[in-house]
Each structure stands twice: as structure tokens, then as C-alpha cells.
Image (cartoon, rainbow, N blue to C red):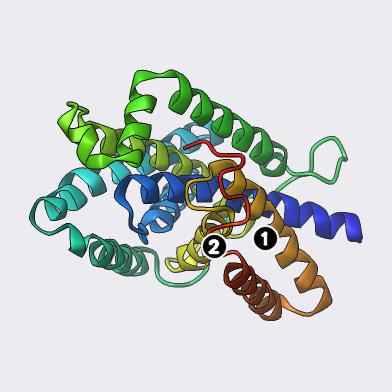
């Protein structure tokens, strides 16, 4: 029983940690919370489930990730960039508005009822583990390692770090800021696509599922420290385990309440994050 609770919490925490990487990147480059990040994840989930009606799982995953990338690219290119030109202070409100638009469009197209994975999941080799669970941690690890290499060893990664450290100076040095924004959003789109696949297979989808995920993923960023990607992954896993344990002891709503109360308490004690400058990537 305890093993099952910890297992569920660990893998859900890996999912939260993966989503928090996208939040951390976007926040550090735009300095705002992108409320629509997890809604793009839900769009990818719907693309995945819908694609399964006419293709296989591998192709459906590719389509879901492609949808996440394209939607993230269009969000930055057609919406956020235009707002930045005229009044950057409106960006936060713009992301919130985009989130509401996405939710309502999805509700019109798919209704607001739960859309479930259309197949019965089978465990792998009698291990009591599903394929999505076996894949989520390696995927999270690969994303983290690629991000580390990208930010530390590549020219575009160094440009991103320069933009985060001092945006105005980066502009004067000729760093292509708009290109950097696009790269960051494309990377976040890949994360959203993979997250949408995991969520749709394990938990089902509603147009409003992204809000709860956004709360926990961004909380992981805040508690770790907003410039600390590794830390947000660790905190995401802890949040997932906490939710699972509290749900076992009480119920789902109480689990969310107690977990959020714990997160708020931590932020009162360590408002700048637990890890500070430790485990820092950006």
C-alpha cells in the first residue's frame, strides 16, 4: 500500500517537475507567469487522444509534441511579441486572457466533461508499472540534461543566460532577443506536448485541468527559487508525493488543501526559495 502511494506520488511529482521547467524558463526570460503554459499542455493532450482514433501511439505522441511546439511558437510570435512592443506591462494580463480563451475554446469543441484515454492501460512485465510511468522519469532526466548542456555549452544557451542576467545589456551587445524568446517557447512547447501525453494517459483531460497543474508547477518554481531549474524539479517530486500521501490519509480535496498550506508556509519562511543559488542552472 505504502509502495503504491509513494510510486503514484513520485511519478506525478516527476510530471509536475517537468512542467515546472517550462514555467521557470518562460518566467526568467519574460519575468511574468505564463498562465497559458499549462493550457497549451492540455491542448497537446487533446491532440494526442484525438489522434489515437486514426493512428498509432508513436505518431500520436509526435503530433501532440508538434501541437505543443506550434502553439507555443504562435503564442510568442503572434501575441506576446506584439504586446511587448506596445506595453510590456500588459503581458501578464495577456497570458491570463489567452488561458481563458484556450479553456473556453476547448470546452466548446470537446465539452467540459472528462475525456479519458481510449485504451485500457496494461502493466509492463508484471511490474505494477505502466509504460507512461516507466518513461516519465527518463524523459525528465533527459530534458534536464539537455537543458543543462544547452544553457552551459551552446551559443544560444549563453545568449539566453545573458538575456536573463541583463536584458538591456544583452540587447546592446547584439543578442537576438526575439530569436531567444522563440527558442525558449519552442522548448517549453516540447515539454507541454510530452506533459499532455502523460496527463491524458493517466488522469484524463478537461479544458480546465491546466489550472491545477499550473498552481503546483509554479509553486515548485517559487519554493525552489525562480532561477533554479534543478530545484524546481526536486520540489515538484516532493509536491507529488505530498499530494499522494495526504490523499491516502484524507481525501483528494484535503490533499490539495494541506499541500498548498504547506507550500504557503514554506514561502513565508523562505520567500526567495529553499535552494537559493545552489543547484542553479540559469
The circle on residue 239 is: 1
The residue drawn where x is 32% and y is 28% is 159
Element under disc 1: helix
CA gap between label 1 and label 2 equals 9 Å
Give the total of numbered labels.
Answer: 2
Q: Is residue 120 visible?
A: no
The residue drawn where x is 77% and y is 72% is 246
The circle on residue 205 is: none
**On the picture, is 60 further left or further right than 35?**
right
- The residue lying furthest to the left in this view is 86
Other residues around mark 1 within 10 Å, as few (<14) / some (14–19) / many (≥20): many
| Residue 149 locus on image (x, y percent) | 51, 23
Circle 2 is placed at which residue position?
219
Nearest the viewer among 260 and 98 is 260
| Residue 4 locus on image (x, y percent) | 85, 56
Vertical arrangement, residue 39 with respect to residue 149, above or below: below
Q: Earlier in the sequence, mark 1 or mark 2?
A: 2
Image quadrant for the N terminus? bottom right
| Residue 235 locus on image (x, y percent) | 65, 54
The residue drawn where x is 46% and y is 62% is 210
Element under disc 2: helix
Q: Quadrant of residue 203?
A: bottom right
**On the picture, is 95 further left or further right than 200?**
left
Nearest the viewer among 191 and 267 is 267
Nearest the viewer among 227 and 179 is 227
Nearest the viewer among 131 and 229 is 229
Image marks 1 and 2: residues in contact by CB distance under 8 Å = yes
Other residues around mark 2 within 10 Å, as few (<14) / some (14–19) / many (≥20): many
Amino acid at each position: 500500500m505504502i509502495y503504491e502511494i509513494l510510486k503514484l506520488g513520485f511519478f506525478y511529482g516527476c510530471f509536475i517537475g517537468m512542467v515546472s521547467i517550462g514555467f521557470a524558463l518562460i518566467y526568467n526570460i519574460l519575468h511574468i507567469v505564463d498562465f497559458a503554459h499549462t493550457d497549451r499542455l492540455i491542448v497537446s493532450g487533446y491532440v494526442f487522444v484525438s489522434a489515437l482514433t486514426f493512428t498509432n501511439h508513436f505518431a500520436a505522441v509526435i503530433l501532440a509534441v508538434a501541437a505543443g511546439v506550434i502553439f507555443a511558437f504562435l503564442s510568442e510570435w503572434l501575441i506576446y511579441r506584439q504586446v511587448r512592443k506596445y506595453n510590456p506591462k500588459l503581458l501578464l494580463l495577456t497570458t491570463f486572457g489567452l488561458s481563458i480563451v484556450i479553456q473556453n475554446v476547448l470546452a466548446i469543441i470537446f465539452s467540459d466533461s472528462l475525456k479519458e484515454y481510449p485504451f485500457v492501460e496494461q502493466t509492463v512485465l508484471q511490474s505494477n508499472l505502466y509504460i507512461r510511468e516507466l518513461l516519465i522519469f527518463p524523459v525528465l532526466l533527459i530534458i534536464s540534461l539537455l537543458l543543462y548542456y544547452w544553457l552551459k555549452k551552446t551559443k544560444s544557451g549563453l545568449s539566453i543566460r545573458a538575456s536573463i542576467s541583463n536584458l538591456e545589456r544583452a540587447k546592446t551587445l547584439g543578442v537576438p532577443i526575439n530569436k531567444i524568446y522563440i527558442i525558449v517557447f519552442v522548448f517549453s512547447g516540447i515539454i507541454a506536448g510530452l506533459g499532455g501525453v502523460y496527463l491524458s494517459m493517466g488522469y484524463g483531460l478537461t479544458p480546465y485541468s491546466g489550472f491545477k497543474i499550473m498552481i503546483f508547477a509554479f509553486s515548485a518554481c517559487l519554493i525552489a527559487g525562480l532561477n533554479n531549474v534543478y530545484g524546481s524539479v526536486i520540489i515538484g517530486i516532493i509536491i507529488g508525493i505530498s499530494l499522494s500521501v495526504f490523499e491516502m490519509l484524507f481525501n483528494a480535496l484535503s490533499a490539495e488543501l494541506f499541500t498548498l498550506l504547506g507550500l504557503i508556509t514554506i514561502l513565508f519562511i523562505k520567500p526567495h526559495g529553499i535552494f537559493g543559488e545552489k543547484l542553479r542552472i540559469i
